[in-house]
Amino acid sequence: MKLLPLAEAIARHVGDGACVALEGFTHLIPFAAGHEIIRQGRRGLHLVRMTPDLVYDQMIGMGCASRLTFSWGGNPGVGSLHRLRDAVERQWPAPLAIDEHTHAGMAAAYCAGAARLPFGILRGYLGTDLPAANPRIRSVECPFTGERLAAVPAINPDVTILHAQRADRRGNVAIEGIVGAQREAAFAARAVIVTVEEIVEELPPAMNGIVLPHWMVSAVAHCPGGAYPSYAQGCYARDNGFYQRWDVIARDREGFLAWMQRHVLGSRDHAGFLASLREAA
Amino acid sequence: MSDWTRDEMMTVAAARLLRDGCVCFVGIGLPSAACNLARLTHAPDIVLIYESGTVGTRPNVLPLSIGDGELAETAACIVPLPEVFSYLLQAGRVDVGFLGAAQVDRYGNLNSTVIGHYDTPATRLPGAGGATEIAAHARQTFVMIKATPRSLVAQLDFRTSGGFLEGRGSRARSGMRGTGPQVVITDFGTLTPAPATDELQLTALYHGVSVEEARAAVGWPLAVAGEIATIPPPTLIELETLRALHARTREAHRRPVHLPA
């Protein structure tokens, strides 16, 4: 594990065309890392995330992605992800191939990836048109009972990026609160980057808490506020107002590009991004 | 009392259908309001599960997202997402699943994926999320939808989640273990599946709503039960509890979030 500045961690581990999962289910979404990928101008990424959320709306709208694996693509509690819709409905700024699943299917695919099995299995995709739309959703017969069960190919990202509350200097990572499929996505990946609110000398005893051990973490970057406008339990709350305002910001291409230029491309790093939002408030 | 909105009536009607102690898989929006209204009135021991993994949660204000911190802080426990779908939902431990959709057909099948063709959609909707497996595995599902001929349709553009499929027992033959949509709660009243055909029929109307109004809001020739029940208006306690919940929620969501330093 290496303690690295975020820009260096991204430069080292995220290449053009890579399969990248920025996970975190509503909570601990690694926005700072997504913004850094945008700043570095990555292209042709295969983005993987159960809920693309604003972070992928931004990356898709800025032209980073050519493929998306996902299971629910909305702005939670608000409505559409307008940049995702524009890419799917009108191929702007680039065509986006979609590999669409259900939450249960994607969870099974991450679990299989973490276990290095070829596919995930579930009693799922029943009564739905999804298998007809996505040829990667198939079925297998149980060798014991003969029951047909759904099968989805394992997800093994080149790199999984997470945000967490804290890590120690060796790179052990502790996550509290809603954990989504972050642990599975990390174990499924070839490389793992974690941005954290704070780096401590020693983590408190974990017992049943979630810890990613340092020997499976490729890089840790200290990045306070790195999940904003999502949140970090115990550090800062989800900015629900921002999620509502995003509906307006992202609705048209010009407004979106101007906002991204001003706040993301126009700032050197995440501290600069947060400062530019404070200035605009 | 005669002064309430259709949203309030829908929420109250849905809340009344939840029995105390039941395990309920909750969606954002009207279902979340209905489940918490039930918890704050007649069902204090209802177990609410949001798909973010917050189990037995008792939020003081309604969350905007499925994973707001409020849900985590008031949960009995938080489990990883794969467990929510495998150990809780697929294993048959959920009594009631609440679903919404952009379109519902006469057999209670749901579309939340696209309007138009899948490969060239006119409108790309968010997609399945948890809905497909909730529809399959919850012991029963309740559907909440505002009725217009564009939302209650003769033909779905895409079937995201299975209800009674083509009707006449086809669900039972499909491998889906739950009993399917037992009620569709609309803003005119409720539809329930007819015993032999599984087709949704009008069985109850809100106070003051006519059968004609219901028919006009449905995009297929609506079957009407021999006897139509009248759903009593919200009680004073129901209305006050719901309005106080919404007022607390508005206040909480208005509070500015301090940007992390």
Image: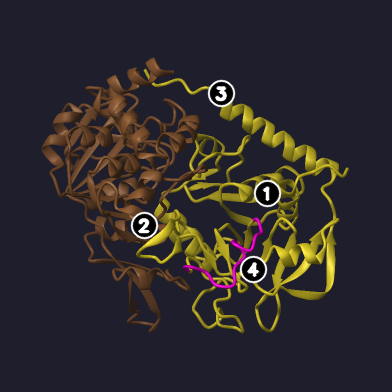
- Which range of residues does the magenta coloring cover? B146-158
Residue that mark 2 sits on: A107
User: Do the residues at discs 3 and 4 belong to one chain?
Assistant: yes
Which of the two labelled residues, at mark 3 and mark 4, occupies the earlier sequence position?
4
Tell us which disc is closer to us: 2 or 1.
1
The dot on residue B34 is: 1
Q: Tell me the residue that label 3 is attached to.
A: B255
Instruction: Where is residue B94? Give x, y as percent.
Output: 57, 60
Q: Residue extending furthest top?
A: A279
Residue A150 visible in this rendered orientation of the protein: yes
- Chain B, hue in figure: yellow
Mark 1 neighbour density, 10 Å: few (under 14) some (14–19) many (20 or more): many
Q: Residues within 10 Å of mark 3 (few under 14, many from 20)?
A: few
Q: Residue at image x 60%, y 49%? A: B48
Q: CA distance from mark 3 to mark 4?
A: 42 Å
Q: CA distance from mark 1 to mark 3?
A: 24 Å
Disc 2 residue type (three-letter): Ala
**Mark linked to residue B219:** 4
**Label 4 residue SS:** loop
Q: Amino acid at mark 4?
A: Gly
* Quadrant position of the C terminus of chain A in the picture: top left
